[in-house]
Image (cartoon, rainbow, N blue to C red):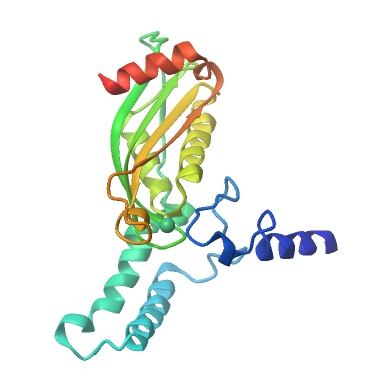
């Protein structure tokens, strides 16, 4: 117990010997699970929205915005609703897509690729958008999944404060669990607005991350997958 506390202190204060200030804009990825408090769901969604509205109103007030203005009046509540019901709804496991599996009656045994899945996420370091495309693939171990569910799984994990490496691995992990196979691949190509609209202000760069599990982790399969994505 004591060791855990110490380790936790060490990891929050120092990250590989660097403090959060040293790291600055360099994005960091600490684990597969989204870091959540044990009591993350002590408040229900309605209570969370009420609380966020109050706090966001305070942020606006501190910035000097006139909250009596007709245009700004509704903003705190709008932001609170958007956070909980939309852009961060993937934090709540209750919103996880229910996935039905079907027998692979077609005996299709090659890779299935669902490409160009557009998603909107948010960088957990700056709370500004990450906009990208995900390509996911799997080889059936005997079960197949409805195609729209692949899309829904991507959207669920995107709707969290994220880092792209974690998003990639969370999607891959979910697919492996659901489809009961290691043979899954996920490629994400995304633009981070914290890089393009502020900070270094690079408008042309994008970030690519990949997960190749099981049989996908061979140069042959990676080439095949890349060919499908580029076709
Ligand atoms: Zn960022």
Q: Is residue 12 above or below residue 151?
A: below
Q: How many marks?
A: 0
Given residues 119 and 194, the one toward you in this image is 194
Q: Residue furthest right?
A: 2
The residue drawn where x is 31% and y is 71% is: 79
Quarter assignment of residue 14:
bottom right
- In what quadrant of the picture does the C terminus appear? top left
The residue drawn where x is 76% and y is 59% is: 7
Residue 209: image location, x then y, percent = 45, 36
Query: Left or right: where does residue 147 sit relative to residue 18?
Result: left
Q: In this view, does 91 lie above or below 210?
A: below
Query: Left or right: where does residue 187 sit relative to residue 116?
Result: right
The residue drawn where x is 41% and y is 32% is: 187
Quarter assignment of residue 3:
bottom right
Q: In this view, does 116 lie above or below 137?
A: below
Query: Left or right: where does residue 76 sit relative to residue 224?
Result: left
Can residue 180 be seen here? The reply is: yes
Given residues 17 and 165, the one toward you in this image is 17
The residue drawn where x is 45% and y is 14% is: 221
Residue 9: image location, x then y, percent = 73, 65
Residue 143: image location, x then y, percent = 45, 20
Can residue 111 be seen here? The reply is: no
Quadrant field for ligand 1 = bottom left
Query: Left or right: where does residue 184 sit relative to residue 113?
Result: right
Given residues 86 and 35, the one toward you in this image is 35
- In what quadrant of the picture does the N terminus appear? bottom right
Given residues 128 and 176, the one toward you in this image is 128
Residue 94: image location, x then y, percent = 45, 53
């Amino acid at each position: 117990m004591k060791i855990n506390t110490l380790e936790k202190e060490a990891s929050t204060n120092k990250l590989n010997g660097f403090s959060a200030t040293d790291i600055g804009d360099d994005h960091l990825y600490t684990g597969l699970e989204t870091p959540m408090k044990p009591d993350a769901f002590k408040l229900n969604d309605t209570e969370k929205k009420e609380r966020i509205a109050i706090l966001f109103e305070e942020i606006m007030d501190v910035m000097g915005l006139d909250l009596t203005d007709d245009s700004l009046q509704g903003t705190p509540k709008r932001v609170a609703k958007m956070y909980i019901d939309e852009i961060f709804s993937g934090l709540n496991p209750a919103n996880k897509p229910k996935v039905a599996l079907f027998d692979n009656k077609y005996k299709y045994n090659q890779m299935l690729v669902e490409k160009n899945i557009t998603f909107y996420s948010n960088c957990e370091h700056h709370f500004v958008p990450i906009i990208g495309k995900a390509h996911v693939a799997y080889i059936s171990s005997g079960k197949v999944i409805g195609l729209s569910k692949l899309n829904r799984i991507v959207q669920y994990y995107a709707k969290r404060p994220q880092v792209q490496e974690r998003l990639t691995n969370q999607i891959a992990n979910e697919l492996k669990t659901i489809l009961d196979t290691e043979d899954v691949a996920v490629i994400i190509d995304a633009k981070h607005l914290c890089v393009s609209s502020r900070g270094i202000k690079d408008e042309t760069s994008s970030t690519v991350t990949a997960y190749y599990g099981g049989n996908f982790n061979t140069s042959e399969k990676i080439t095949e997958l890349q060919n499908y994505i580029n076709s």
